[in-house]
Image: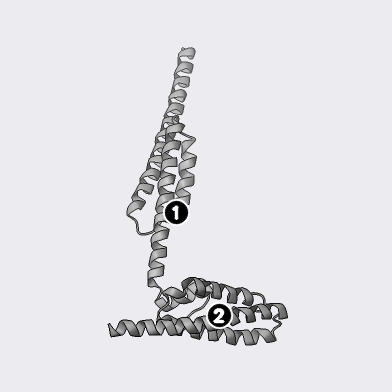
């Protein structure tokens, strides 16, 4: 009789343990399924949810409670690839919208001085004795690369930018600009001035010719 009770007790405990394991298995499977479904649902979202990383960690943790870990790991890996592709796509779309929202004058300033460095206020306070030579050099290189695409209005805007940079140079000279850098800047200015003058006249003439047609 005692043996029978003992056997029944062991059986109940074993069943309870098995039931507990089955519940963990079921819950783990649901967690993985939810993660996969969540990533799939992002395809129609306008932005990525901030809780993606948390869901990803939970899914990884749930896999340890599954018997068929390989299948779950494969599904999670596929979802991660989907997420990475979606993130790249959304970031590209946001970047394109940002570019479209920027006006032509700001695009010109960005092209000649770097993204967001120079605003509508033409404030060159970010230019100092350490970086001024590289600013002049980058400006001149970008100008040469794009001069054929500039309109008459662009040339007028570039003239204002260049004058603003030169004005800043006068200040920087008093703040310790080295004679070596000053000489290199003078060389850039010597090359730029006649090139700009000719190109600007050409752009105006070309626009007048088009207006006559």
Left-right relation of 55 to 174: left
Residue closest to the eye, 67 or 160: 160
Q: Position of residue 5 (x, y in %)?
A: 46, 17
**Secondary structure under badge 2?**
helix
At 41% across and 50% down in the image, what residue appears? Answer: 85
Nearest to the observer: residue 108 or residue 22: 108
Residue 100 visible here: yes
How many numbered marks appear? Answer: 2
Return the residue at label 2: 192
Image height of 131 relative to 44, above or below = below
* Residue that appears at 42% across and 82% down: 202
Disc number lying in front (2 or 1): 2
Classed neighbour count for the residue bearing mark 2: other residues with Cα under 10 Å, few (<14), some (14–19), many (≥20)? some
Q: Is residue 123 visible?
A: no
Q: Position of residue 66 (x, y in %)?
A: 45, 33
Question: Whole-Å distance between the Cαs marked 2 and 1?
Answer: 52 Å
Give the position of the C terminus as an image quadrant: bottom left
Looking at the rendering, which quadrant does residue 136 occupy? bottom right
Residue at coordinates 47% horizontally, 44% vertically from top-left? 58
Badge 2 or badge 1: first in the primary sequence? 1
Residue 191: image x %, image y %?
58, 79
Pointer 1 residue: 51
- Residue 189 in the image, given as x and y percentages of width and height: 59, 81
- Residue in view at x 60 percent, y 82 percent: 190
The part of the image, by quadrant, that contains residue 12 is top left
The structure's colour scheme is: one colour
Q: Is residue 145 left or right of residue 186?
A: left
Q: Secondary structure at mark 1?
A: loop
Residue situated in front as seen by the camera: 170 or 22: 170
Q: Is residue 150 above or below residue 35?
A: below
Q: Residues within 10 Å of mark 1 (few under 14, many from 20)?
A: few
Asked if 157 appears above or below 41 in the picture, the reply is below
């Amino acid at each position: 009789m005692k043996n029978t009770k003992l056997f029944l007790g062991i059986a109940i405990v074993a069943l309870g343990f098995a039931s507990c394991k089955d519940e963990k298995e079921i819950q783990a499977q649901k967690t993985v399924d939810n993660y996969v479904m969540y990533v799939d649902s992002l395809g129609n979202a306008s932005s990525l949810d901030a809780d993606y990383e948390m869901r990803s960690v939970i899914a990884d943790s749930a896999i340890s409670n599954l018997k068929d870990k390989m299948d779950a790991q494969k599904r999670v890996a596929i979802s991660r690839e989907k997420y990475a592709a979606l993130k790249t796509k959304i970031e590209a779309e946001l970047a394109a919208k940002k570019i479209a929202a920027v006006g032509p004058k700001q695009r010109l300033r960005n092209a000649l001085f770097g993204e967001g460095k120079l605003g509508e206020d033409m404030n060159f306070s970010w230019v100092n004795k350490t970086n001024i030579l590289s600013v002049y050099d980058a400006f001149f290189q970008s100008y040469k690369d794009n001069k054929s695409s500039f309109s008459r209005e662009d040339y007028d805007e570039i003239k204002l930018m260049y004058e603003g940079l030169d004005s800043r140079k006068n200040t920087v000279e008093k703040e310790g600009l080295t004679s070596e850098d000053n000489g290199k800047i003078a060389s850039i200015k010597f090359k730029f001035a006649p090139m700009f003058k000719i190109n600007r006249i050409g752009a105006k003439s070309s626009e007048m010719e088009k207006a006559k047609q």
